[in-house]
Image (cartoon, rainbow, N blue to C red):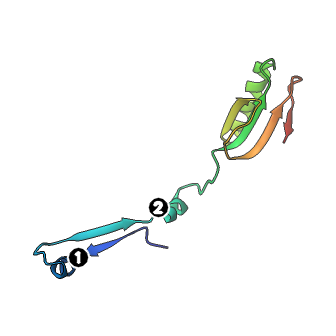
Amino acid sequence: PKSVLTGGRYDKLMQKMGKSSAAIGFAVTLSDLNTYSKSGQTYDYDVLISYEPDCDFAALLAQSAQLRETGLSVRLELVGETDLTVLHRYRFSKEGGLTLC
């Protein structure tokens, strides 16, 4: 375990600065906080499926549903560049098959 929140009382620091006041302060270490997420996931989706605009959408949705039933998160996008971070990239062919990229 590692602390992600630190802080305390700073009354004496205020006195050193010539102020007669109580003081508290804290800091949150956001970079360490990411390590405590439930999934530990470092990507946007498990699977990205790129498809052509004239593909068989029914087959595409069926493939996507099969992957989702296994617990994977799936994103469908037209073929092109994307800045998403994914675990697996597939290309959906006009014939209805998936090809790992």
Percent position of residue 61, x then y: 73, 25
Instruction: Determine which of the numbered discs, if any, sits on residue 30 in the image.
Output: 2
* Contact between labelled residues 1 and 2, with CB atoms less than 8 Å apart: no
Looking at the picture, tell me which residue is in the foreground, 25 or 33.
25
Query: Disc 2 or 1, which lies upstream in sequence?
Result: 1
- Quarter holding residue 45: top right
Secondary structure category for the residue under label 1: loop
Q: Amino acid at mark 1?
A: Tyr
Q: Where is 17 relative to 72, above or below?
A: below
**Residue that protrudes farthest toward the right in the picture:** 95
- Quarter holding residue 58: top right
- 9 sits to left or right of 20: right
Percent position of residue 14, x then y: 18, 76
The residue where tag 1 is placed is 10
Percent position of residue 81, x then y: 74, 36
- 99 sits to left or right of 50: right
Residue that appears at 76% across and 45% down: 88
Residue that appears at 87% across and 23% down: 94
Q: Where is 68 relative to 62, above or below?
A: below
Q: CA distance from mark 2 to mark 1?
A: 22 Å
Local crowd size for mark 1, using a 10 Å CA cut-off: few (<14), some (14–19), many (≥20): few
Secondary structure category for the residue under label 2: helix
Local crowd size for mark 2, using a 10 Å CA cut-off: few (<14), some (14–19), many (≥20): few
Looking at the picture, tell me which residue is in the foreground, 35 or 69.
35
Residue that appears at 72% across and 41% down: 47
- How many numbered discs? 2
**Residue that protrudes farthest toward the front in the picture:** 18
Q: In the picture, which quadrant includes the C terminus?
A: top right
Looking at the picture, tell me which residue is in the foreground, 85 or 67.
85
Q: Amino acid at mark 2?
A: Leu
Residue that appears at 52% across and 57% down: 37
